[in-house]
Image (cartoon, rainbow, N blue to C red):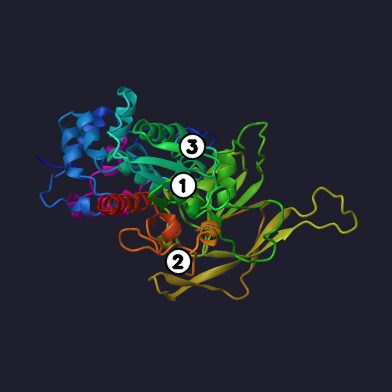
Amino acid sequence: MAVDPKKHEMPTQAPEVRAHNFSEVALGYTAEIAVEEAKRCLNCKNKPCVQGCPVNINIPDFISHIKNGDFEGAYTEITKSSSLPAVCGRVCPQETQCESKCTLGIRFEPVGIGRLERFVADYHNEHVKEQPIPPKSNGHRVAVVGSGPSGLTCAGDLAKKGYKVTVYEALHTAGGVLVYGIPEFRLPKAIVAKEVEALMALGVDIEPNVVIGKTLTIDELFEMGYEAVFIGSGAGLPNFMGIPGESLKGVYSANEFLTRSNLMKAYLDDPHTPIMKGGKVAVVGGGNVAMDAARTALRLGAEKVYIVYRRSMEEIPARKEEVEHAIEEGIDFQILRNPVEILGYNNPDDPRDPKNGFVTGMRCIKMELGEPDAKGRRRPIPIEGSEFVLDVDTVIMSIGTSPNPLIKNTTKGLDVNSHGGIIVSEDGLTSREAVYAGGDAVTGAATVISAMGAGKTAASAIDKYLMNK
């Protein structure tokens, strides 16, 4: 039977419609499309796609269930390895992971593995209302710091083995970066809440509004009777460029901008937590977070939104799909450009002038690409005499984040690297006995699925440690 060379398109809202609402952009496969896409899978015996999945989902097996119309069987297969299938099906970079290893992709487009995973999870959530039954307790207690993807994965895997797990979350809602960092139009909050509810049904306790390092320390968790601790506190400390004008009103980190909009409802007409709306916005950076910030600003009513990125479109690190969606929605990409100063209004004759201290523009310089750097990416070099001013009144810095030093500074004997990341062994063990870590707290900002993989690895190591103990 001939194989369709192209994967089935994902239905989406029209760009001119979605650019003005926060509803999900991708609408998902129908059952008919999912079955047809599943038929493209060659069911390879050596399963190369599994090697590209950080949590080792048995991809050919779950797709085989879809081919046969057994969508619940597919869900059961996925959840043997993943605690967050509806999340992963939406935000994981499958094109550089499982789909990049797909044998079909050698000659044609790879199987739409992520789209099929999303379909299966959504089908289950729509048709199955029963929650999982918690297993028999094994009598051991584990604390998890942070309810992001690594923490939730570690908690879920341990709960399935009978551990009593408590997750401590600094914010008022569980989900970590899944709820404060990823916009509704890419990952609806109801989807994350549904995944969290399933974990709670397994017996996982969620304790919000607890800042580990402030409210409680790691040492105090052990004093409370926990036998092991997993740190999945993420990388929520924003980086800035260190250029003049970054302290002006109207300059945000992408973290602050997205948290205000996503979790603190600054998008409402009369918000308790305000945010700059309208005007002209520049987002500095080229990753997925930059795309999220730019597209959020557009939906909040900005008349013009720029992405300012110092390299070329070929090197932009954001997912191809997110870049395409941003272009379709009218985001202006200022490529090979780099900010050197943020300009502001200053009226020394009238210090009460309400415009004092606000952004009025951003001075940029044009760049060209030189020789590759240590990571193999061509180094951007400023072009002398090419400075120009971009007319904007809001600037959002999206140039990466670092792990917050709070836990490091309040935990004796916890080794970290020069970037503040917690140093761990292959199984996630830190320099402290019974303290494990994973995700962005270790690596710095990375992908959701890599954080999940770290949580899964640590859960296995914690189980082995406590059972041997």
Q: Which residues are magenta?
A: 92-118
Q: Position of residue 287 (x, y in %)?
A: 46, 55
Distance Cα–Cα, label 1 vs label 2: 19 Å
- Amino acid, disc 3: Glu
Q: Picture coordinates of residue 99 (x, y %)?
A: 26, 50
Q: CA distance from mark 2 to mark 3?
A: 36 Å
Q: Residue at x 26, y 52 (%)?
A: 464
| Distance from Cα at disc 1 to Cα at disc 3 | 21 Å
The kind of secondary structure the magenta stretch mainly shows is: helix
Q: Residues within 10 Å of mark 1 (few under 14, many from 20)?
A: many
Residue indicated by mark 1 = 146
Q: Which residue is mark 2?
A: 415
Which of pointers 1 and 2 indicates the residue nearer the eye? 2
Kindly tell me whether residue 333 is visible in this rendering.
yes
**Pointer 2 or 3: first along the chain:** 3
Q: Residue furthest right?
A: 349
Residue 227, image x and y in percent?
Answer: 38, 49
- Which residue is depicted at the point 31% across and 55% down? 96
Q: Is 301 left or right of 78, judged from the image as shown?
A: right
The reply to whether dot 1 and dot 2 touch (C-beta < 8 Å) is: no
